[in-house]
């Protein structure tokens, strides 16, 4: 049963004065914000979504555009704070490969390039920031549904140090699931 139904059932049989006190202490499970979203699709593959949210006196709005052409998807978002977000994704430029280019204007340090490779028994992901001293991230895992081995590394090129170095191994059987993470 959902939490709302169980919560309602707990109030049944409660005297009205106690019920009123319980309801007054209960956290709000509803929103008083106003939100408006409008999405339109074109036959050429473009999608435009406009949305606005009013939370108290604060108003936030954005316009999202998604353009698709063969295996390349471009997402562009502009918000009321004059931020410009762009994500360009090339899906399957080679079998199992996916590349993603992300940047935000006016933040020059937000650029990022990601490369993902997915195979039946292996997955590799790498990303690098587009800055003078970028952080380089690498993630890789090999294995089957029975045993797997993986690592997650991050290297800071400014200091020359590994800022993240994790490794793990997992074993799964019908009656046993064991994993070790370092």
Image (tube, grey):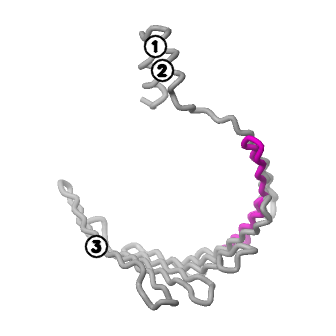
Gap between marks 1 and 3 measured at Cα? 51 Å
Residue 139 x, y percent position in the rendering:
43, 77
Along the horizontal axis of the image, is 94 left or right of 125?
right
Along the horizontal axis of the image, is 2 left or right of 72?
left
120 or 76, nearer to the observer: 76
Give me the residue at 28% from left, 69% from top: 181
- The answer to the question of whether label 3 and label 2 lie on touching residues, with beta carbons closer than 8 A, is no
Q: Is residue 26 visible?
A: yes
Along the horizontal axis of the image, is 75 left or right of 10?
right
Residue 53 falls within the magenta-colored stretch: yes
Along the horizontal axis of the image, is 66 left or right of 121?
right
Q: Quadrant of residue 128?
A: bottom right
Give the labeled residue for mark 3: 182
Residue at the outermost left position: 175
Element on which disc 2 rests? helix
Residue 87 x, y percent position in the rendering:
68, 71
Element on which disc 3 rests? loop
Q: Looking at the image, is 13 positioned above or below residue 182? A: above
- The answer to the question of whether label 2 and label 1 lie on touching residues, with beta carbons closer than 8 A, is yes
Q: Which mark is residue 18?
A: 1
Give the labeled residue for mark 2: 22
Q: Looking at the image, is 162 positioned above or below residue 85? A: below
What is the magenta segment's predominant secondary structure? strand
- Provide the residue span drawn in magenta: 52-79
């Amino acid at each position: 049963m959902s939490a709302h139904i169980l919560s309602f059932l707990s109030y049944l049989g409660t005297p009205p004065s106690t019920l009123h006190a319980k309801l007054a202490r209960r956290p709000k499970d509803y929103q008083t914000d106003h939100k408006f979203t409008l999405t339109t699709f074109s036959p050429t593959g473009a999608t435009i979504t406009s949305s606005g949210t009013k939370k108290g006196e604060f108003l936030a709005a954005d316009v999202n555009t998604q353009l698709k052409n063969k295996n390349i998807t471009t997402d562009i978002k502009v918000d009321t704070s004059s931020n410009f977000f762009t994500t360009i994704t090339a899906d399957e430029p080679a079998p199992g490969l996916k590349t993603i280019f992300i940047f935000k204007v006016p933040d020059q340090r937000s650029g990022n390039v990601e490369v993902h490779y997915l195979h039946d028994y292996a997955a590799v992901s790498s990303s690098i920031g587009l800055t003078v001293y970028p952080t380089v991230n690498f993630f890789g895992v090999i294995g089957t549904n029975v045993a797997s081995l993986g690592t997650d590394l991050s290297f800071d090129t400014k200091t020359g140090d590994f800022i993240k170095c994790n490794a793990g191994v997992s074993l799964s059987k019908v009656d046993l699931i064991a994993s070790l993470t370092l």
